[in-house]
Amino acid sequence: MTETVVSIEQTKFCVNGRPTHQGRSWNGLSIEGLLFNSRMVQALSDDENPSTRGVWMYPDGEEFSAARNVREFLAALKDYRAHGLDAVGINMQAGSPQGYSGVQPWVLTGFNADGSLKQPWLDRLEQIIAACDKLGMVVILGLFYWKQTRIFDSEEAVRNAVVNMVDWLAAHEARNVLLEIGNEVDLPFAQPNIEAARGDELIKLAQERSSGKFNTPSGRLLVSTSLAHPKPVNEKIMGSADFLLLHGNGTHHPDSVRLMVRANRAQPYYRPMPVMINEDDHFDFDKADNNFVAAIGEDVSWGYFDYRMNRERYEDGFQSLPVDWTINSARKKGFFGLLKEITGA
């Protein structure tokens, strides 16, 4: 059982019964109840496609190793926490190791075709949950990534994957985990029961399956699913989710973030709940206004998404394999520096 317990009170995230950053303000903006996070989806990764695996070789000449990858991630966690990071976002099907990729031939998935779980992925997940627990951190665990859902045999296999994952989390009493069913479910998934039009089905399945199995205020997992486009979330998802998960990648200005959040809260089916952006590839951390600052002004948690762009070096980007998990690029330093200032860490 984890000592760290994540819960929700109205619009605030709480850890161990108290709102995060209780009483803290920055530049006149309250950050109480916000959960600052970073997208670290490759922490569990291991490419099973022998044709692409060699692409992820380390600069020192060592072949990609899932053991090395998770070991170096775990070693960096304490530094993230020291800068004020509350949560890390990981995924059982990772994400594109090239940032944005139309063609994704690699095989990055912790699920088998029938929805059963792969033990090596679970072993790494257990290490991450335990390490975050020791630091008082939350894990935002995603299950499905659109390009990798091709591995599933059927919609039933997808449901099996949700049930198996929920049961595993319950058996490990992982009370510091928030569950994200799918990453950007308004994209086309191989199995339609993950997509936005039916997004409430798997949210409800995870909630019902976990009910009564967790010694937490809700007695179950807190569940949501994320969307890519900056348009209002549909009524099915908003009506079933415990918290709202938005992405800022499709915004073009900090004001776009403000409008996206306000548009969701203006929907007639909106109810008070925490709002979190858990993926945003806009930076400008040295400027007075940026997406991070805009989110805080709207009482919204914000998540840093950093990938290695064209002609960038090994140290650039947390999503691109192989990952340098240390805070040593200008962009990483910019984010963590502002985070530390905001949180007073």
Image (cartoon, rainbow, N blue to C red):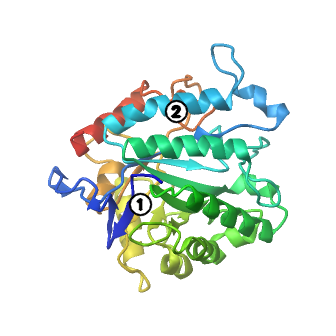
- Identify residue for label 2: 73
- Neighbor class of circle 2 (other Cα within 10 Å; few <14, some 14-19, many 20+) is many
Q: Is residue 84 above or below residue 205?
A: above
What residue do we see at 55% from left, 25% from top? 312
Could you say which disc has been placed on residue 260 in the image?
none
Asked where in the image residue 163 lies, by quadrant, the reply is bottom right
- Specify whether 72 is left or right of 10: right
Q: Is residue 203 above or below residue 15?
A: below
Q: Position of residue 34 (x, y in %)?
A: 32, 57
Q: Position of residue 111 (x, y in %)?
A: 74, 53
- Specify whether 265 is left or right of 224: left
Residue 149 seen from this side: yes
Local SS, label 2: helix
Q: Amino acid at mark 2?
A: Phe
Q: Nearer the viewer, residue 19 or 170?
A: 170
Local SS, label 1: strand
- Neighbor class of circle 1 (other Cα within 10 Å; few <14, some 14-19, many 20+) is many
- Specify whether 181 is left or right of 299: right
